[in-house]
Image (tube, grey):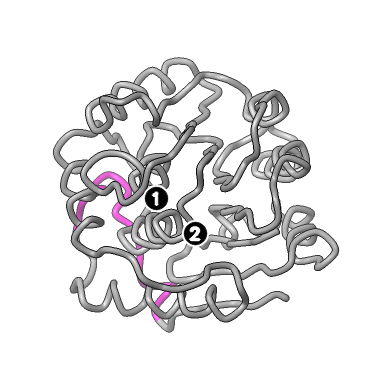
Amino acid sequence: MFKVYQSEDWKDYRMSFNDPHKVLEPLEKEIKIVGEALEVLKEVGIIPHTNYDNEKLLAHRKAVAELFEIPWTAITHRMQRLIYAINAIKQPANMIAAGVFCGNTFISNAGAGVGPGAVYTAKNLIGVEIKPHEAERAERNVRKIDPTGVARVIAEDAVDTVKNFDDEINLLYLDADGDRARGKGIYLDILQNAYDKMPKGSVVLAHNSVNSGDRLNAYLNFVRDPKNMSASVNVIFDPEGLEVSVK
């Protein structure tokens, strides 16, 4: 089953890339729009319910704003909330995030399992960044919010990470870039190498489902095919978009 959730203002709700903590709208509107998207995810069976702790999310957001070095980001507050909420609801034992840059998108996922936003205990929360200097910065950021080491960032090719992971993968977040020929098309390579380790009910989140839609054509065809994933929703409430799929 494939559906689209699209807010009326998605084209106008634009991130200030160099001001990652800028408030773009009243909090009530942010909560409402993300709540509408979560309802669609529930309708198609991606998540069992839409309940998450708003105060925990805000505590997480505050810690990231105070502690993380973020040179720029395309992750809006709406997207941060959605990613956090999905992780808080699904509570993946093992989560792998591919292409994490400075760690902001990674901790939007992992923040439901570690730090002031934690609502459950995870086994492995792994961020993967192929550029060593970026991975080092992301790891420094994460250590400020998670002293346990459950959440960690490694410098590696995400295809190799999922291929060599020796446990099941319960949630996979995709935001990586491949070589010039593939670009975001590498999402499909990563997912296909993780696929057999993902039990039924596992979730895949693919950022840039809108603004990189052409490069993601093969990936989107794969996750929207009911032979591969039981449901997929393209959440469009900012110009980047997030494809949310469940096995």
Q: Quadrant of the N terminus?
A: bottom right
* The magenta stretch spans residue 18: yes
Name the residue rendered at 69%, 33% in the picture: 180
Q: Residue furthest right?
A: 227
At which x and y percent is residue 26? 18, 74
At which x and y percent is residue 19? 23, 47
* The magenta stretch spans residue 210: no
Q: Dots 1 and 2: beta carbons under 8 Å?
A: yes
Residue where numbered disc 2 is placed: 240
User: In the image, what residue type sits under mark 1?
Assistant: Ala
- Left or right: where does residue 96 sit relative to residue 33? right
Name the residue rendered at 22%, 27% in the picture: 144
At which x and y percent is residue 98? 56, 36
Name the residue rendered at 22%, 56% in the picture: 56
* Nearer to us in this view, 144 or 202: 202
* Nearer to us in this view, 139 or 75: 139
Q: Which residues are magenta?
A: 9-22
**Number of other residues with Cα within 10 Å of mark 1, as a class: few under 14, some 14 to 19, many 20 or more:** many
Residue where numbered disc 1 is placed: 74
Q: Is residue 72 above or below residue 53?
A: above
Q: Is residue 110 above or below residue 161?
A: below
